[in-house]
Image (spheres, helix red, strand yellow):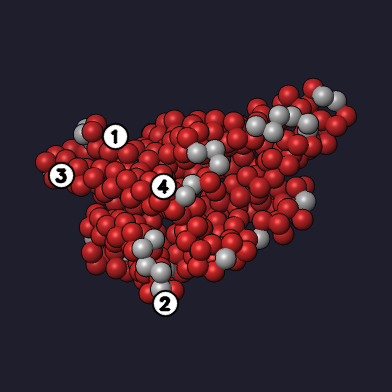
Amino acid sequence: MTKNNILWSKVWAIAAVQGAITLTYIVYNLYLPALIFELRLSTSLATTILIVEHALAAFIKPVFGYLSDRQQRRFGTRIRMIVIAAILASAFLIIVPVLVILGEINPIWRRLFPTIAISWAVTTAICYVPTIALLRSCAPPEKLAQAASVLTLVVTIISALQFDVHNLILKLGESFTFTISSISLLAAVALIRWLYPPQRAMINNHELESIYLPIFALIFTIGLGIAWGIRFLTPTLNNVFSLQIGQDHSRLAIMIFFIALGLAAFPAGKLATKLGNSFGMLVGLAVTIFCLQLLILVPNQIILGMILIILIFALSLVLNSSVPFVFSLVLHQDTGLGTGLYFGGLAAGISCFNVVFPQPQQITINIGAIGTTVSFLLALLAIAFSMQLKIQED
């Protein structure tokens, strides 16, 4: 990589893996209740499995992020861990619908279903963090947000599919969708394997000391706050859209919102490059909180549309800047650990949210607005404190 260049081919390869993982999560989450029903297991098992999976991911992502750092220092690559985890995740994902067929023949197979499902989630989490950590080598620090915009684009647009085309996905059948999802992940990882040959890492002696411990805790807190904020924001927006355009069109509106969020990634990435990742996150969170308050107070649809555009751009700024901001807080040798702590915080937030709010569709506008505001304020304060600690450490 030259000094001012972004390695776009590698960035798109990383985005392909993240997109494939996102697709597997969508397919898995959509089919899980139906598969459990076919196996004649408890209907509450789906919620329990998802909570356990996210709770395990909160621990696994930092641990394997750290282990990927050690692998990078020892072998000059993180790819081995990514490839092995992706192969296992793909295998477990294909086994999940197979167990449903076998479970109809012999009840013993039914008991294996939770174990296989959780094993898939664990191996997917192991694959996720080292892949994101590769982004740091794809661009100079000041352009990482611009590179991250590709990941935001791919992940948010694929995530948008779950809101209004879920019935189409379900009509395709579990065997077909699970197989296609697994093949997509393997193909994306094969591309990364080809683009990232091993290269011995060079670490300066003065970088061998571990980063200040409170910063690690703050990185986890940032992920936790953003996870809760987005979880509260989605039903809040759904309620706003239901009031403005009717409940029948609210899911389509949410899907369009997330697609627009992805499309806003490129201009938001360029703005983050100019503002800096830390300031970009602070501005993005502050504007998101402000726009949310206006959304629930302004009845005029034209003004509401303008507020939504600003909200989309501000939230995209946050999503683009988050990973580059984490990179700026940690040394190169701790890239995987820092990334794992951030996404571990996201996973912990999702797990806790699912426990406290098992039916998020019942969250009212006021509760959603308050929850989003408090969650994003928590993330904002954690960012500010981490910036101060980093300045003191430097």
Q: Nearer the viewer, mark 3 or mark 2?
A: 2
The earlier-in-sequence mark between 4 and 3 is 4
The earlier-in-sequence mark between 4 and 1 is 1
Q: CA distance from mark 3 to mark 2?
A: 40 Å
Q: Nearer the viewer, mark 1 or mark 2?
A: 2
**Residue beneath disc 3:** 388
Vertical position of residue 187 compared to residue 243: above or below: above
Residue 171 visible in image: yes
Dot 4 amino acid type? Ile
The earlier-in-sequence mark between 3 and 2 is 2
Q: Does dot 2 land on a helix, a strand or a loop?
A: helix
Residue 367: image tag: 4
Residue 217: image tag: 1
x then y, percent, for residue 135: 40, 53
Q: Which residue is at a point 63% across and 61% down the rendered structure image?
A: 164
Q: Nearer the viewer, mark 4 or mark 3?
A: 4
Q: Which residue is at a point 36% across and 59% down the rendered structure image?
A: 292
**In the image, 197: left or right of 139?**
right
Q: Nearer the viewer, residue 366 or 238?
A: 366
The earlier-in-sequence mark between 3 and 1 is 1
**Residue beneath disc 2:** 302
Q: CA distance from mark 4 to mark 1?
A: 27 Å
Few, some or many residues within 10 Å of mark 3 (<14, 14–19, 20+): few
Vertical position of residue 29 compared to residue 248: above or below: above
